Image: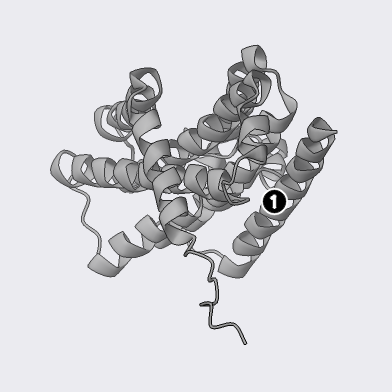
Amino acid sequence: MSNAPALTAPPLWPIYWAEFVAELKKTFRQPGFVIPSLCFPLGFYALFGLLMPHRGSFDGTTWFFATYGTFGVIGPALFGFGAALASEREAGWLDLKRVSPLPTGALLLARIGMSLVFAVIIFLLLSTLAFVAGGVRLPPSAWMLLGLVLVLGTLPFCALGLLIGSLARARSAAGWVNLIYLPMGALSGLWFPLFLMPTVLQKLAYALPAYHLGQLSLAASGQIEVVVWRHVAMLLLFTLVFASLAARALQRSVK
């Protein structure tokens, strides 16, 4: 009878954590990614939310705080997955990681974590600017709810970025992201209120994921009232569709 000790598998969380830390270090060493991701939403909010005059009872400082917060958190999710994944896929890094002992999904979770970190930073920076320069005052529960909406709301756009990165070539991925990101932000009512647009564009916005996240952000900040579950359901649907299509595209690239 053998008395050899039973072998147990080591815990996986240190590997996932190490991959997440490595992803953060790699990302923050790229000023061409970090500076635009953090400065664009601040600049847009300063221009449209603080400097431009707002007529009547329209609370532009709070409204644009919510919408440009939405616009801001979408960017790192799209570019972090789209352009970066396309480059790594063509360079062969994904193939290398597939044959390495790295657990399946570690790279994906690390990149999602990176997007969430950027969302938190963008929310904190915008909150500071809105509070100090814009005089925005929300109940503590509203601040927390808006932050939660923006951070979790990055997930559908991580899936969309994954889809872009799994299909586009490295040289064109950033262009495709911009082609989707900027028009989607404008047509979703993130740059200026949707009620100022023609009726046909207001109806078109319902088909865009950024619109639904924007509506939840505006509701969290007390600007509008919405049927929350409808927008949450649409964002979940977008996430499932984008993730499923991306998984199929990546499987084909392996073959």
Residue 195, image x, y percentages: 55, 43
Residue at 21% over, 56% down:
137
Residue flagged by tag 1: what amino acid is it?
Phe
The residue wearing badge 1 is: 238
Q: Quadrant of residue 13?
A: bottom left
Q: Secondary structure at mark 1?
A: helix
Residue 194, image x, y percentages: 55, 41
Residue 68, image x, y percentages: 40, 38
In the figure, 89 relative to 226: above or below? above
Residue at 53% over, 83% down:
3
In the figure, 232 relative to 165: above or below? below
In-front residue for pair 143/192: 143
Residue at 59% over, 46% down:
101
Total numbered labels: 1
Residue at 31% over, 63% down:
144
In-front residue for pair 126/86: 86
Examine the rendering and report whether any part of residue 60 can be seen. Answer: no
Q: Quadrant of the N terminus?
A: bottom right
- Mark 1, Cα crowd under 10 Å, few <14 / some 14-19 / many 20+, is many
